[in-house]
Image: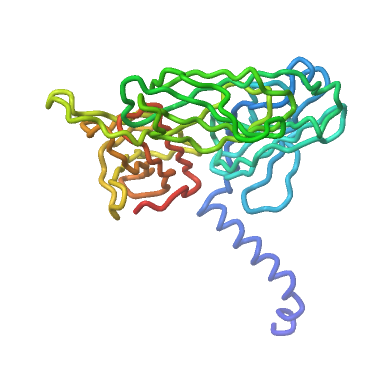
Amino acid sequence: MTKWFKEHIPTLTILGLLVATALTMIIFGDPQPLEKAVISGSINLNGIDSKIALNKGNLVLMQRQHGQSDFVTTNLIMPLADEQTWSWTEAKSGVTYDLQSDLFFNGQHVASSNILTVTAPATDQVFTFNIQSLNLAEDVIPETKAIITGKVFIDGFIPDAATISIFASGQSLQDTEQVITNLPAQAITDFAWEGALSGQEYQLEARLIDADGTPIGTSRKYTLVAPAKSEILQLSSQATPLLLEETSQTASISGEVHISGPLTANSSVLLLQRTIGDSNFTAFDRLNPTVQLDWTLPNLTPGQKLEITAVMQVNEQNTATGEIITPTAPASNQIINLDTGLNLSNPL
């Protein structure tokens, strides 16, 4: 019996493994493949005339799982046009990806976009290209006058008679120049600069000016290549309002939570706020992410600056944290990005 057992050890081992595998499948079931999910967004194309680009260029969507080193193609080819929308339908739900778009002209790789890190499913993902004339032939970007348009978003108190000035610096300018002046200041103000040159890189900056000519708020410098449209400059007013009547002393901050990644049962979004310098956040609202994504923080003092963020919870336990924004009341259109597969900040 002992001799027989020794001779059949390999066979018995294989049979044992097969039995163990079968029992595992019975107990735990077959591993379920991840569900497909969609990641979608748009293209912000600066520096190329869209009509020329559409005829000669295209974009290829590249992906890698977050943490890996090499990008691989998704085989999604997109027309090269400003504000072109795209949609990748082969993502896996719950998987975090790095996405990048590669730009080709006449079959030659010219540039790569910014890298987006996002968990599927997701929407509103924007690839930005700033293509300078030195990268392309002159017939693609002829050096002509070009227009840069956009909006200035202001949060905080805006005094009467305040104006907005736009300053630019870049290759075709001697120094930082004031290119737009005396725009009436509003919470959202449109601007258009028609003196840029196509294919040239510029840094734009918006300044809020009070009635005495004193700057009371400056945006960060924003780099782009002309022509460009729908660009956003954002600044916070440093002005302090005069003491108002009791009935008109309050202001609010409002916006939306943009969620990427899958939602599980019993999920909710907890909104948190704290005064600059405080260590602890306080909850001010809870959203059902399948129904509501907009939020409002009311009853604030005009000029009050806060840190605001959002936390994804499942059964009221934290699972992911969103980015922290720092608006000044009053303010609107404030976006908090929250990825269920990533921690964008650590507020708690």
Side of 118 relative to 295 (left or right): right
> Which of the 4 image quarters holds residue 292?
top left
Up/down of 341 relative to 24, above or below: above
Side of 93 relative to 268 (left or right): right
Q: Is residue 343 visible?
A: yes
Q: Nearer the viewer, residue 337 or 75?
A: 337
Side of 57 relative to 330 (left or right): right
Q: Quadrant of the C terminus?
A: bottom left
Q: Quadrant of the N terminus?
A: bottom right
Up/down of 330 relative to 146, above or below: below
Q: Nearer the viewer, residue 94 or 311?
A: 311
Q: Is residue 39 visible?
A: no
Q: Which residue appears farthest toward the bottom when viewing the image?
A: 2
- Which residue is found at the position 42% from the left and 40% from the top? 264
- Which residue is found at the position 47% from the left and 43% from the top? 340
Q: Position of residue 17 (x, y in %)?
A: 65, 64
Up/down of 171 relative to 321, above or below: above
**Count of numbered tags:** 0
> Which of the 4 image quarters holds residue 123?
top right
Q: Position of residue 84 (x, y in %)?
A: 66, 21
Q: Position of residue 202 (x, y in %)?
A: 65, 32
> Which of the 4 image quarters holds residue 141?
top right
The type of colouring in the image is rainbow
